[in-house]
Each structure stands twice: as C-alpha cells, then as structure tokens.
Image (cartoon, helix red, strand yellow):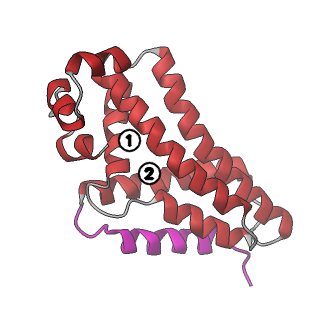
Amino acid sequence: MDTIAERGLDGLTMAGLGRQVGMSSGHLLYYFRTKDELLLQTLEWSEGRLGAERSALLSRPGTARERLDGYVDVYVPDGPRDPHWILWLEVWNRSQNADAEARARQAAIEGAWHRDLVAILAEGVSRGEFRPVDPDRFATRTRALLDGFSVHVAVGVPGTGREQVLAHVREFIEQDLLPRP
C-alpha cells in the first residue's frame, strides 16, 4: 500500500516490489496476475481494516450523531498522499477499463460504506436526532460530498486540509440533517 501511494501504480514495477518484499516478480505475478489485481487486492485489504473500524464504531453506545461524526472521521483522509485514498484514486482511474468482476468487487467495497451510513442515518431519524430524511438518498449525497472533499485532501488542493473539510461537513450536517429549533 505504501509503495503504491508513494509511486502510483504506473511507477510500480513487479520486480521493484518483489525486491522490497523479498519475492521474485514471478512469484508476485503468480498470486496477483496483474498490477491492477495487486491494486484491487491491496484496496480490499485496506478496506477490510477500515471496515473493522467502522463496525466497531457502529456497535458502540452513543448517539447516532456521535456515530456519524466517527464515520466522517474515518472517511476523510489524514492529509495529502494518504495511502488509503491514493489506492482509491488509482482504482477509480482504472475502473473505466476494468472487467465486470473487478467492478463488482469495487462496488461491494463502496456498498459497505453506503450501507453503514444508511444505518446510522436511519437510526438517527428513528430516534428523532435527525430530520425525517430518506436515509439512502441522504447517504448518497453525503458520500458524494465526502468523496469530493476527500479527493481534494488526498491530492493536496490548497485550502482543503482535513480540518477545513471536517468543518464543511459539520456545517452540511447541521444545516441539512439536524432538526431545526
């Protein structure tokens, strides 16, 4: 993951990666077949770690708003060149030429994020913590907002650091989701 984040997939060679991890390029190709497969499996591994973090977040006691804030915190990159987000950028860049299986695997990852957000929103609506929004529609809009801001953070667009993005997202939630006094 760090090598892909540092060099990008185009700057990665199987021979170079093999030297880094103490394997031959042939051995790597045996397991991954292509660099695109290596990328997707690395993303799946990274997402598995974040998925466990999200699951713990969803199961802890507290308000739906606290869980939503935690979800956003896990979602937004730590800063420019965040390895997890660089993986996503690489996958999205290659997805237009990906086969149906690779697209389905990517959709499964994105679907898990979406379902978790829908669950948080539905809980908040049912408890009266949030306005009566359609959780699926609101999750779609929120993830689009998070994705757009997160790309800016990951590539280092000036003025869109993590703290600025978190402030924008808090404002969006307060204006569009929290009940009005």
Seen at 24% across and 60% down, the residue is 157
Q: Where residue 49 sits: x, y (%)?
A: 51, 49
Taking depth in this image into account, of 92 and 54 the one nearest to the observer is: 54
The kind of residue on which mark 1 rests is Trp
Front residue (pair 133, 155): 155
Task: Kindly identify which numbered label has been placed on residue 147.
Answer: 2
Tell whether position 177 is magenta.
yes
Q: SS at mark 2?
A: helix
Reply above or below: 38 against 6.
above
Which amino acid, mark 2?
Asp
User: Which residues, given as a range, are shown in magenta?
Assistant: 157-181
Query: Which class describes the residues within 10 Å of circle 2: few (<14), some (14-19), or many (20+)?
Result: some
Residue 72 circle label:
none
User: Of helix, strand and loop, which one carries label 1?
Assistant: helix
Which of disc 2 and disc 1 is earlier in sequence?
A: 1
The answer to whether residue 175 is magenta is yes
Mark 1 — residue? 88
User: In this rendering, which labeled residue sits more in front, label 1 or label 2?
Assistant: 1
Nearest the eye: 144 or 73: 73
Q: Quadrant of residue 14?
A: top left
Q: Position of residue 169 (x, y in %)?
A: 50, 68
